Structures are given as structure tokens and as C-alpha cells.
Amino acid sequence: MTIAPLQQVDSYVYLGKEVNMSNDLSIEIGRRRKAGWAAFNNIREVMIQLKDPKLRAQIFEASVIPALTYVSEVWPDTKGTATALFTSYRALERALLGITRY
């Protein structure tokens, strides 16, 4: 068995959270936003077929919100972090309801 030396990197993903040397959360927030949209796109066809708004909301809350907010409980509670997550949440809600901004 050969042992390779560890590489020095600027960032890595550990337990689903991106850790970087500068402790910059913007990269991780971007990853969470992408994960939220990916989860929404996975259930989009089901949402189109469902007519019950309560059931649609339950599916949305069970699948999209955990993807969007994963590990956010350990982030510092700053206005920028809250704004970024809330903006994505509202955009996902609009997509769920089929409402466009323009």
C-alpha cells in the first residue's frame, strides 16, 4: 500500500459543507442555492400534476427547504446571509406558484 502525501487546497467539501481557508460563506451559500433549485427541479413534474395546494406545500417543505438550508444553522446570523437565503426561498416559492416577477 502506497501512501500519497496530502495536497494543500484552498477549499474542500466536508460532510456536505464547503470549507475554505478564507472562511467565506458566499461559496457555500451559492452551493445551497443550487441545491435548492436542483431539489425543486426534481419535483417540478409532480408539482405540475398536483392540484392540492396543501400537499404541494408539504412536498416543497419536505424536499426543497432542507436542501436550501442544510448546515445553515452553523453559519453566523448576518443580514447578508439571511437576505441571500430569503431571496432564494422567495424565488422558489414563486416558481412553485407559477408566478413570474415581470
Image (cartoon, rainbow, N blue to C red):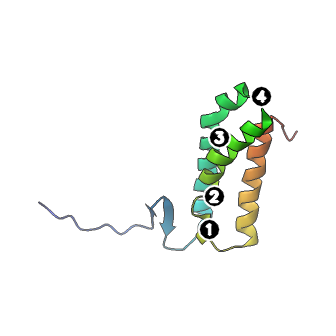
Q: Are marks 1 and 4 in contact (CB under 8 Å)?
A: no
The residue at which mark 1 appears reads as 73
Q: Amino acid at mark 2?
A: Thr
Mark 1 and mark 4 lie on one chain; the one further toward the N terminus is 4
Q: Are marks 2 and 1 in contact (CB under 8 Å)?
A: yes
- Quarter holding residue 97: top right
User: Residue 40 shows which numbered tag?
Assistant: 3
Q: Amino acid at mark 3?
A: Phe
Tell me the CA gap for discs 4 and 3: 17 Å
- Relative to 39, say whether 17 is above or below: below
Quadrant for the N terminus in the image: bottom left
Q: Position of residue 96 (x, y in %)?
A: 75, 38
Secondary structure category for the residue under label 4: loop
Q: Position of residue 12 (x, y in %)?
A: 44, 63
The residue at which mark 4 appears reads as 51
Q: Are marks 4 and 3 in contact (CB under 8 Å)?
A: no
Residue found 88% across the figure and 39% down from its top: 102
